[in-house]
Amino acid sequence: MDILMISILLALIGAVLFTLIGLVSGTDETAIMVPFTLLVILLGAPPPAVFSFFMAAILAKHLTHAIPTALMGIPGDTTAVPLIDHASVLRRLGVPHVALRKMVSGGIIGAFIALPTAIIFGQFLGQFADFFKASSGIIFTLAAILIAYFSKGKWVSILMIIPFAFFIKSLDLLSFSVLEKHLSISFFLGIAIGPMFSDLLVSLSSSARGALKREKPKEYHLAPELKSWSGYFPNPFRVLTGRQTLFTSASTFVSSLTFVFSPVGMTSLMGEIVASRTKGIYKKSTSSLTVMNGVTESTYIAEVLIPLIAFGIPLSPVALGPGAPLFNAPPVFTSDPVNNLHNFLTGWEFFMYGAIGLIIATLIAYPFSMNYARKATVLVMKNISQEAIVGMFVGLACLLAYHEAHIVGIILTLTMATVGGLLNRVLGVGSGVQFMIFYGSTWMMLQIIGI
């Protein structure tokens, strides 16, 4: 089949799949993006089609994560957490449907601004690729320290860098002694599903499960669905005011260049900047939500594209998390030596196949979010168990780990998930910090103990 047709087909699958996944509140982008992207890569999809799938999935997920965030006041995923306060204000004002429409329209604008901006900036930074590749070990270590400092578990995250690197290297040497090859997929699958897996462990512990128990089911009150446009596909520029469009365009352009910073941090920062320059509760909340959801899109797209185009090694929080398989999915893609999408796609192909993913996701997720948000939310809340979703992703991770290293891969994945998940949930050592430590662990242990 022609590569273009495969790309369109996989973008369609990614858009539909992650439009539905986005409705499930509380899902973590890394835990859901990594297994599915790895699966597409290992099944033999051509590199352009892999990229189209990923771009469609990212946009679709971040459009429909607005639905539980706006309508129920619970974050659709980790990047939606900063949006909760403004979304709650609009819920109290009785206009959650307005919040939703502003958010998804801002997301569309952010995505289509980020794609060309990131490609151009990535090609510019490509002039310094040799330096970054040669210094990758120390860069990952410094990046781990930087991200740890700005994480919620600041000092404990910094303190755990060396012990966690030692733990990773120990597991690497042990698995190498059994298999005579270094593993990669099993490590970052374990880190990816860690937070989910730790919740499962807590639920199995008689001494800890009390923290998860509830006296009665949560109650949610959804506002009636109101439609203020004709036809099926609304125009995002008519949903937003001129001022909101301008703010969103400027914010997403700037955030597309800051590829080394946390997406959650950039989302919060841009939202607060807009809020400080807008008067009135309604205008402040709607404008902030528009900008913030646009920034979640722009940061995710840019933080994958810029290091992918410029260096071929994952040098951003998103590249080390949800985008990790695009850089490192042995034996298909590797980052040391660099043999991944950085080598296989030109700047024009990144734009073309990225645009295919974004356009297809827009055609599916945007009108779905605008027209059927309430009905879909009711369906998910009544009929889909979040525990089943968690179990599905853990099972998929084990399948991929078995593909890499059979039973050793599964044991390694679950070991990493246990340690990494508890570090994340209990101590606040985030997945981004853990991924940075994983990539820098070999260099750190070589410098400290010589192995």
Image: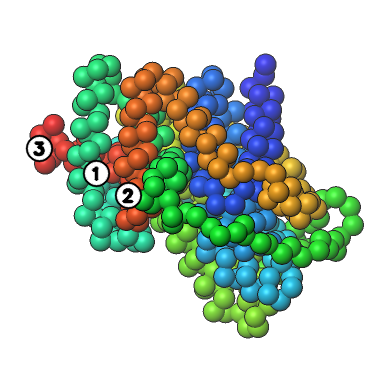
The residue nearer to you, when weighing 232 against 419, is 419
Q: Which residue extends farthest bottom?
A: 279
Foreground mark, 3 or 1?
A: 1
Instruction: Tell me the CA gap for discs 3 and 1.
Output: 14 Å
Residue 151 place in picture, x, y as percent:
35, 59
Q: Amino acid at mark 3?
A: Ile
Residue 149 place in picture, x, y as percent:
30, 60
Q: Residue at x 62, y 43 (%)?
A: 385
Q: Is residue 446 above or below residue 102?
A: above
Q: Quadrant of the C terminus?
A: top left
N-terminal label among 3 and 2: 2
The kind of secondary structure element at disc 3 is loop
Q: Assess disc 3: are there few (<14), some (14-19) or many (≥20) residues with their C-alpha within 10 Å of its C-alpha.
A: few
Q: Quadrant of the N terminus?
A: top right
Instruction: Tell me the CA gap for discs 3 and 2.
Output: 24 Å
- Which of the 4 image quadrants contains residue 177? top left
Residue 32 place in picture, x, y as percent:
53, 40
Residue under label 2:
423
Q: Are marks 3 and 1 in contact (CB under 8 Å)?
A: no
Residue under label 3:
449
Residue under label 1:
164
Instruction: Tell me the CA gap for discs 1 and 2.
Output: 10 Å
N-terminal label among 3 and 1: 1
Q: Is residue 33 above or below residue 158?
A: above
Q: Amino acid at mark 1?
A: Phe
Disc tally is 3
